[in-house]
């Protein structure tokens, strides 16, 4: 007893409020009766369990613990010793069970633990917040030959031992349970592990094996648990492993490169958990899945399964967790009529192509709490009547093809707290009176349906709504019942037909998220200073309305503000940035704001996106905006289509973090600032339609992330040559537009040899600039937009920017041949080299441009014939070869003959359709082509003889009428008789 009391004192302080064992140790009682203490028949302490006692004080080698010589079982797990593991455990010679997992130990494992030769079970797992290291796994276990259970999860095995771990464990012949998750082990996963014939538990999650699973793993006769989650496995998973008779738990999830399929499962299989989510498993779900009568969890999320769901799923009466999303399942949904213990269907049938009816039997399952079937193709929702007994709390049927009136049975789901019916085809009255009578409902999304305008309800008792989403619900006015929703946290009324004034009471709801964009709103009620007092509002979206007048004052803690596409027409207050300390996203684009851009915007130090485009701002660009482009700050700056003057400030910081800079359509002059080259993450640069001067910006070629470069309509000059600077430039460049400048010289092939994105015809994975900030549901992101000339028309690119590729060098002074290297751009959509001085022939390799949609090489000095390979470009929908010196017959194909004759005009030797087709569709007479290729030596004798013949015929008729009187009298009498006969 004295040793135990001494130990208790040494382990102080411990939190008595959380202690269940130590605080009950009373010296007046028999110590063998104390909680956590076990004695043998001679009253020797043989077992000590101090787990979960919140012990925060450490102990050392002198602790009385090591004097308990008869101790066999020691459990110190789940404490907070916050020290190294003390030496002295080798004194406990009789120890067979040692558990110090999650006890707050860190540092190196003492070698004296390897002297506990009687150990049968050892658990040294440090937990998430502590780091324990094993210098040598082999030295630790070489004497522990009696070990049957070895748990080392989270231990850091030295790198030089990482690939030898299997061999280090070979002395442990009796090993039955092995858990070494997240131990920095490396591959390959060796089949030598099968030498441990008695293994029943294998847990090796979170190691980097980079190998297949050996076929020999199917030979484990006693295996009950196999967990290889997140191990970078590849190859084909051995299907025979699923047939191990004793196997109850298998988890091979989070292995993206692991392929496999489900075999037929035998009747009476023992599996109760199958997790293969986020792998490349594919094929159908076999009907024999119904043979696994003990299955409680089936998780196939994010795989490639297809086919219909087997009806035998209804045989899984023990099922409590089912995740089949997203996959490629089709066909109807099984009834699940027998799965009485099913509790989760949650997010786990979504994102498939399941169709048909949603069976009413699904809602009769007595323990079912959550259903999520969103993003499928369901067309009908079966009704049922006894929903009042349901415990269903969450129902998501959004993004389907469901139609009809509001489902009546939902009004009987008394436990419902979350409901989403958005993006379906429901119609008719919404019956909010009945819907809001569900007293547990706090999250409601009924957006994007065809509800009739019947939501202005009035009754005293309301549920405590926290989230309400009614976008695109045909609303004509703000629902008045919102006035009493004091708990409302998030409100979306966007894309309705609400007109008139934004009421003042809306700002008194203490909202965090408010979206009333895309309506017909014209004014804000009351003084605009009202907004400044709304301290709770974090997200405010008013875009795409008809709001007018001065700019509304921003809420004091707002992070997201979108006032774009309205009619605001004021000067921005000079102190605007002083009360935007929390702002991350600010767009005022497409309004009528004027005046200077305030310098105080630079005081909004959290700002990551600033869009002031398409207004009437004047003055110069504040130089401090450029200095904001540092890590964690400004990523997107869009000032396009204003009246800004001056130069671009040369103030970009050394660690510039800017990804988009759009200054198009202003009156900026001077050169591109050299400090812009420090923006190493720049993706979009649009400086078009300004007065910028200088040579080609070779200093930007070190920006490897650049995807869009637009310099058109400026005053650049000189060649594109950059010397040695063009060795590795712009591998992911998608759009290059330098049209309407004064560039000159030849287009050399080396300029284009590294533009790899344009060379690969698979779809590029370009992603818009994300502003990683959570606003209730999902992240806010910004889609870059650029203006390009495509098929002769100006086009604004937003959503298709991720796959669009274009080169526009038109209206410059380039000369020489078209580079052969351009013909390697298999992913190119638009090529415009028109209005230059290019010469030579059109390369025959132009047939490589399989994705080309628009080709304009007009107004150059190209000669020779049109290559026949041009006819193979099946996506080509715009072609202009006019005003060159091309000769020969236009190649015959459905593609080329579909273009207008103007696409080929102005060439001195071209012939063939469509040049020789009249407007009525009839062929003109083919003309003999001259041998000479120069226009000056071409004489068309057929045309000349027709003119002479016509002149002679006119002379035979006219001359007698002029000089022979009798002929003239006879002619007019004859003409008079003919007229009287026609018009009596």
Image (tube, rainbow, N blue to C red):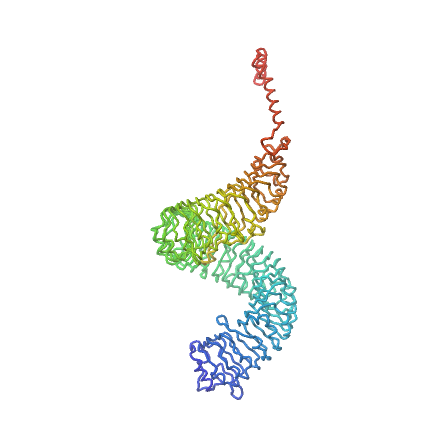
Q: Position of residue 635 (x, y in %)?
A: 45, 55
Q: Position of residue 666 (x, y in %)?
A: 42, 45
Q: Quadrant of residue 263?
A: bottom right
Towards the viewer: 274 or 198: 198
Q: Is residue 629 above or below residue 35?
A: above
Number of callouts: 0
Q: Position of residue 902 (x, y in %)?
A: 56, 36
Query: Is residue 863 visible in this depiction of the protein?
Result: yes
Q: Is residue 99 above or below residue 522?
A: below
Q: Position of residue 690 (x, y in %)?
A: 44, 44
- Most extreme residue toward the front, as rendered? 723
Q: Is residue 654 left or right of residue 222?
A: left
Q: Look at the image and tell me in which quarter the C terminus lies.
A: top right
Towards the viewer: 174 or 478: 174
Query: Is residue 317 visible in this depiction of the protein?
Result: no
- Most extreme residue toward the top, as rendered? 966
- Most extreme residue toward the bottom, as rendered? 42
Q: Is residue 64 above or below residue 708?
A: below
């Amino acid at each position: 007893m004295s040793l135990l009391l001494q130990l208790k004192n040494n382990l102080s302080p411990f939190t008595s409020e959380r202690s269940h064992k130590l605080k009950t140790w009373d010296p007046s009682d028999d110590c063998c009766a104390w909680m956590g203490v076990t004695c043998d028949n001679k009253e020797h302490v043989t077992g000590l369990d101090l787990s979960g006692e919140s012990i925060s004080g450490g102990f050392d080698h002198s602790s009385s613990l090591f004097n308990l010589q008869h101790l066999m079982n020691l459990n110190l797990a789940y404490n907070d010793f916050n020290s190294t593991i003390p030496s002295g455990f080798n004194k406990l010679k009789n120890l067979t069970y040692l558990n110090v997992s999650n006890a707050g130990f860190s540092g190196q494992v003492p070698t004296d633990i390897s002297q506990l030769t009687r150990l049968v079970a050892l658990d040294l797992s440090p937990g998430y917040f502590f780091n324990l290291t094993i210098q040598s796994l082999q030295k630790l276990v070489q004497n522990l030959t009696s070990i049957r259970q070895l748990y080392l999860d989270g231990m850091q095995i030295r790198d030089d031992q990482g690939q030898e771990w299997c061999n280090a464990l070979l002395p442990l012949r009796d090993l039955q349970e092995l858990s070494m998750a997240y131990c920095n082990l490396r591959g390959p996963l060796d089949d030598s592990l099968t030498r441990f014939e008695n293994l029943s538990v294998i847990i090796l999650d979170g190691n980097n094996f980079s190998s297949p699973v050996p076929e020999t793993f199917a030979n484990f006769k006693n295996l009950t648990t196999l967990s290889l989650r997140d191990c970078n496995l590849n190859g084909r998973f051995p299907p025979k492993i699923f047939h191990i008779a004793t196997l109850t738990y298998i988890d091979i999830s989070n292995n993206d490169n692991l392929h496999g399929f489900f075999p037929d499962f035998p009747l009476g299989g023992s599996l109760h958990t199958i997790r293969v989510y986020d792998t490349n498993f594919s094929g159908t779900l076999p009907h024999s899945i119904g043979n696994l009568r003990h299955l409680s969890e089936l998780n196939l999320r994010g795989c490639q399964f297809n086919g219909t769901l087997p009806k035998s799923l209804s045989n899984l009466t023990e099922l409590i967790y089912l995740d089949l999303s997203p996959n490629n399942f089709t066909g109807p949904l099984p009834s699940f009529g027998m799965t009485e213990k099913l509790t989760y269907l949650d997010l786990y049938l979504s994102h498939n192509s399941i169709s048909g009816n949603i069976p009413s039997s699904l809602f009769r399952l007595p323990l079912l709490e959550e259903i999520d079937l969103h993003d499928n193709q369901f067309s009908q929702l079966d009704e049922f009547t006894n929903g009042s007994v349901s415990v269903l709390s969450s129902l998501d049927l959004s993004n389907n093809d469901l139609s009809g009136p509001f489902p009546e049975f939902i009004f009987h789901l008394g436990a419902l707290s979350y409901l989403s019916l958005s993006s379906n085809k429901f119609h008719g009255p919404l019956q909010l009176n009945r819907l809001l009578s569900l007293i547990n409902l706090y999250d409601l999304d009924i957006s994007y349906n065809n509800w009739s305008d019947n939501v202005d309800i009035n009754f005293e008792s309301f549920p405590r709504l926290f989230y309400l989403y009614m976008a695109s619900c045909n609303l004509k006015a703000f629902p008045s019942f919102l006035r009493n929703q004091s708990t409302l946290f998030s409100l979306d009324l966007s894309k309705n037909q609400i007109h008139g004034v934004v009421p003042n009471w809306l700002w008194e709801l203490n909202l965090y998220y408010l979206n009333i964009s895309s309506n017909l709103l014209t004014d804000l009620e009351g003084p605009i200073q009202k907004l400044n007092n709304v301290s709770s509002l974090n997200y405010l979206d008013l875009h795409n309305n008809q709001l007018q007048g001065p700019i509304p004052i921003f809420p004091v803690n707002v992070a997201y503000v979108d006032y774009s596409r309205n009619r605001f027409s004021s000067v921005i207050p000079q102190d605007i940035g002083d009360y935007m300390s929390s702002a991350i996203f600010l767009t005022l684009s497409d309004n009528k704001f004027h005046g200077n851009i305030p310098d105080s915007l630079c005081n909004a130090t959290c700002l990551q996106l600033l869009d002031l485009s398409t207004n009437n701002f004047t003055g110069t660009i504040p130089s401090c905006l450029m200095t904001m482009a540092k890590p964690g700050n400004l990523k997107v700056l869009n000032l396009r289509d204003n009246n800004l003057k001056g130069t671009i400030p040369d103030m970009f910081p050394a660690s510039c973090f800017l990804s988009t800079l759009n200054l198009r359509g202003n009156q900026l002059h001077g050169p591109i600032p050299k400090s812009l080259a420090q923006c190493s993450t720049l993706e979009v640069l649009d400086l078009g339609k300004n007065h910028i001067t200088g040579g080609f910006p070779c200093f930007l070629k070190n920006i490897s992330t650049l995807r869009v470069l637009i310099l058109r309509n400026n005053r650049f000059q000189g060649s594109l040559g950059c010397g040695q600077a063009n060795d590795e430039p712009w591998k992911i460049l998608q759009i290059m537009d330098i049209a309407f400048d004064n560039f000159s010289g030849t287009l050399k092939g080396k300029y284009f040899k590294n533009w790899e994105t344009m060379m690969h015809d698979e779809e590029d994975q370009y992603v818009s600039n994300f502003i990683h900030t959570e606003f209730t549901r999902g992240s806010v992101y910004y889609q870059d937009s650029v203006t390009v000339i495509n098929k002769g028309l100006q086009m604004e690119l937003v959503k298709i920017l991720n796959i669009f590729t274009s080169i526009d060098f038109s209206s410059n002074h380039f000369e020489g041949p078209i580079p052969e290297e351009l013909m390697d751009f298999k992913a190119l959509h638009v090529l415009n080299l028109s209005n230059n001085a290019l010469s030579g022939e059109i390369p025959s390799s132009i047939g490589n441009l399989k994705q080309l949609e628009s080709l304009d090489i007009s107004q150059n000095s190209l000669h020779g014939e049109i290559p026949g390979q041009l006819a193979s470009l099946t996506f080509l929908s715009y072609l202009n070869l006019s005003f060159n010196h091309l000769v020969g017959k236009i190649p015959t194909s459905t593609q080329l003959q579909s273009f207008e004759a103007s696409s080929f005009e102005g060439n001195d030797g071209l012939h063939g359709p469509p040049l020789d087709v009249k407007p009525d569709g009839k062929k003109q007479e083919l003309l003999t082509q001259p041998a000479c290729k120069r226009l000056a030596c071409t004489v068309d004798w057929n045309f000349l003889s027709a003119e002479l013949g016509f002149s002679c015929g006119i002379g035979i008729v006219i001359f007698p009428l002029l000089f022979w009187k009798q002929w003239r009298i006879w002619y007019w009498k004859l003409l008079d008789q003919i007229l009287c006969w026609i018009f009596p």
